Image (cartoon, grey):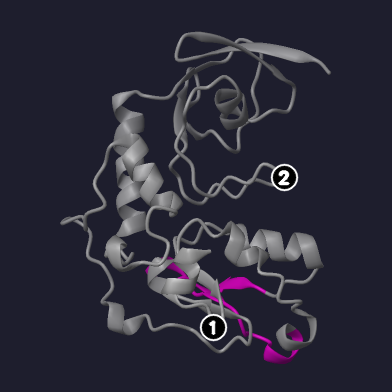
């Protein structure tokens, strides 16, 4: 396969035509934060906005969506890039339950791991007003999956894996803006008939937003 040459943070990198910047960076051991990236997805989602980089001549772009080009110069740590990432991170945690010690996915959560990796605190941002938890109750209407919207970062991984494996949009997002949430039972009869209870949606969830029905914190932590 044809190769292109580029630089990422002044490091020479070779990658196949069609490779996304994020893929080329990670393959070259150059870390770029990401939470919604799915290697197998044909169309990148680009929803978390944590993988912004600066490409010379193009400005800010999401590294998971832009293919590499010959001679491309990519910078992953500029002041502007870091500022945009911090803003994206604040948006992710503004509506998130940050009581990590009480969460069944404590120390297994990708959002938590990312915070440690990029050296930021999982602390409610003072300049972003979060939604009170009482307005975001647990959704247990689905026979198989419990959904906790205050743990959800709208990364789209569960929607993708469900559609990819079963060819049916059993999961999807509803509403807009800070009211966006996952719907597990928009068509309850279809879900109950076709959902195989495989648990893949919960398995790819980077936080504690999804878990199989009946799985409590103790059994989840033990597993």
Given residues 208 and 180, the one toward you in this image is: 208
Q: Which residue is mark 2?
A: 40
**How many discs mark residues in the rendered view?**
2
Instruction: Please tell me whether residue 173 belongs to the stretch shown in magenta.
Output: yes
Q: Visible in this render: residue 81?
A: yes
User: Residue at 79% across / 81% down in the picture?
Assistant: 194
The numbered mark at residue 214 is 1
Q: Is residue 204 above or below residue 193?
A: above
Q: Earlier in the sequence, mark 1 or mark 2?
A: 2
- Estimate the x, y position of residue 92 in percent, counting from the top left: 37, 56
Left or right placement of residue 187 versus residue 30 in this view = right
Give how far apart the Cα atoms at labels 1 and 2 are: 30 Å
In the rendered structure, which segment of residues is drawn in magenta?
171-190
- Estimate the x, y position of residue 168 in percent, counting from the top left: 78, 71
Given residues 185 and 97, the one toward you in this image is: 97
Q: Residues within 10 Å of mark 2 (few under 14, many from 20)?
A: few
Q: Secondary structure at mark 2?
A: loop
User: Residue at 71% across / 83% down in the picture?
Assistant: 191
Q: Secondary structure at mark 1?
A: loop
Of the 4 image quadrants, the one containing the N terminus is top right
Residue 218 placement: quadrant: bottom left
User: Residue at 80% across / 68% down in the picture?
Assistant: 166
Left or right placement of residue 170 versus residue 12 in this view = right
């Amino acid at each position: 396969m044809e190769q292109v040459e580029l630089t990422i943070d002044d490091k020479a990198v070779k990658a196949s035509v069609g490779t996304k910047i994020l893929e080329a960076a990670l393959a070259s051991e150059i870390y770029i934060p990401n939470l919604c990236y799915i290697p197998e997805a044909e169309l990148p989602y680009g929803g978390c906005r944590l993988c912004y980089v600066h490409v010379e001549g193009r400005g800010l772009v999401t590294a998971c969506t832009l293919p590499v080009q010959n001679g491309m110069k990519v910078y992953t740590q500029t002041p502007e890039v870091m500022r945009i990432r911090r803003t994206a991170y604040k948006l992710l945690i503004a509506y998130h339950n940050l009581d990590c010690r009480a969460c069944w996915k404590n120390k297994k959560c990708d959002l938590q791991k990312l915070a440690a990796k990029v050296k930021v605190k999982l602390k409610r941002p003072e300049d972003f007003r979060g939604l009170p938890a009482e307005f975001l109750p647990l959704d247990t209407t689905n026979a198989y999956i419990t959904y906790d919207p205050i743990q959800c970062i709208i990364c789209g991984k569960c929607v993708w894996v469900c559609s990819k494996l079963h060819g049916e949009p059993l999961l999807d997002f509803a509403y807009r803006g800070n009211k966006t949430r996952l719907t597990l039972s928009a068509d309850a009869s279809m879900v109950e008939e076709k959902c195989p209870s495989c648990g893949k949606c919960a398995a790819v969830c980077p936080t504690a937003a999804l878990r199989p029905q009946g799985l409590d914190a103790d059994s989840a932590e033990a597993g």
